[in-house]
Image (cartoon, rainbow, N blue to C red):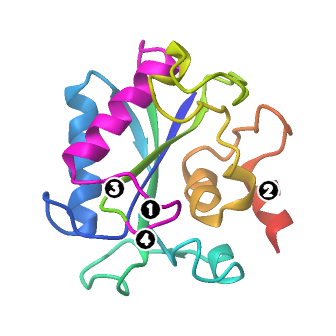
C-alpha cells in the first residue's frame, strides 16, 4: 500500500487551499499515479503553532468557508504506481513546485506539502547522502515517514481510509497511534 499525505495552508497559483489539493490529485494522475482512495479533508493548526493544538484535527465534509488563516487542510490518499519510492518523491516535489512552493524553513507556511507516509511496507533509513539516487536529490527518503505516529493530521485521515493498515516498524494501527497521542 502506498499512502500519501497532502496539505495546504496557503492559496496557490491553482486557487484556494482546497482547490490546490484537488489540483494536486489531478497532477498525480497526469504522472500515471493512480489514486485509489481519498480521505475527507481535515483542518489542523500549523505544526509550530502549539504542540497541544497539533493533536487536534477537525474533519469536515463541507468547506464552504476557508478555515482560519494559516491553518492546514489535509487529506491522505492511497495510490498505486510502478514508480520506485525515489521517483515518486521526485514527482511529488515537482508538483509542489508547480503549485508555487518554495523550499525554506521547516514547518513554514506553504501552498502545497506532499509526503510519502508509507511505500509498500518498505523501511529505509535516512543515512544515505543527499545526492544518492535513492533520494532523488532531495532530503533523505525515510520510510515510513518518521512523523506519522506523532501527527493527528496524518493519523485521522489514515484511520478513515486505511483502518487496518499497520505501521511497518511499530506494527500499530493508525487508531492505536492516535490514542497514544492523548
Q: Are marks 1 and 3 in contact (CB under 8 Å)?
A: no
Q: Which residue is mark 3?
A: 112
Q: Which residue is mark 1?
A: 74
Res. 83 in view: yes
| Residue 82 higher or lower than 148, as above or below | above
Badge 3 marks a residue whose secondary structure is loop
Badge 1 marks a residue whose secondary structure is strand
Badge 2 or badge 1: first in the primary sequence: 1
Residue 180 percent across, percent down from the top left? 85, 64
Q: Which residue is mark 4?
A: 72
Badge 1 or badge 3: first in the primary sequence: 1
The label on residue 177 is 2
Q: Are marks 2 and 1 in contact (CB under 8 Å)?
A: no
Q: Residue at x 33, y 55 (%)?
A: 112
Badge 4 or badge 2: first in the primary sequence: 4
Residue 51 picture quarter: bottom right
| Residue 101 higher or lower than 180, as above or below | above
Amino acid at each position: 500500500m502506498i499512502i500519501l499525505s497532502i496539505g495546504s495552508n496557503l492559496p496557490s497559483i491553482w486557487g484556494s487551499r482546497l482547490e490546490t489539493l484537488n489540483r494536486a490529485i489531478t497532477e498525480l494522475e497526469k504522472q500515471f499515479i493512480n489514486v485509489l482512495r481519498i480521505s475527507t479533508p481535515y483542518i489542523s493548526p500549523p505544526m509550530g503553532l502549539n504542540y497541544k493544538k497539533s493533536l487536534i484535527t477537525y474533519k469536515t465534509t463541507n468547506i464552504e468557508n476557508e478555515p482560519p488563516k494559516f491553518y492546514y487542510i489535509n487529506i491522505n490518499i492511497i495510490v498505486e504506481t510502478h514508480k520506485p519510492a525515489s521517483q515518486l518523491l521526485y514527482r511529488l516535489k515537482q508538483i509542489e513546485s508547480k503549485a508555487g512552493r518554495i523550499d525554506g524553513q521547516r514547518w513554514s507556511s506553504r501552498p502545497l506539502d506532499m509526503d510519502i507516509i508509507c511505500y509498500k511496507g518498505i523501511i529505509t533509513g535516512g543515512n544515505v547522502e543527499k545526492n544518492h539516487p535513492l533520494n532523488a536529490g532531495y532530503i533523505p527518503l525515510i520510510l515510513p515517514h518518521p512523523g506519522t505516529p506523532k501527527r493527528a493530521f496524518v493519523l485521522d485521515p489514515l484511520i478513515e481510509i486505511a483502518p487496518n493498515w499497520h505501521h511497518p516498524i511499530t506494527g500499530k494501527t493508525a487508531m492505536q497511534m492516535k490514542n497514544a497521542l492523548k
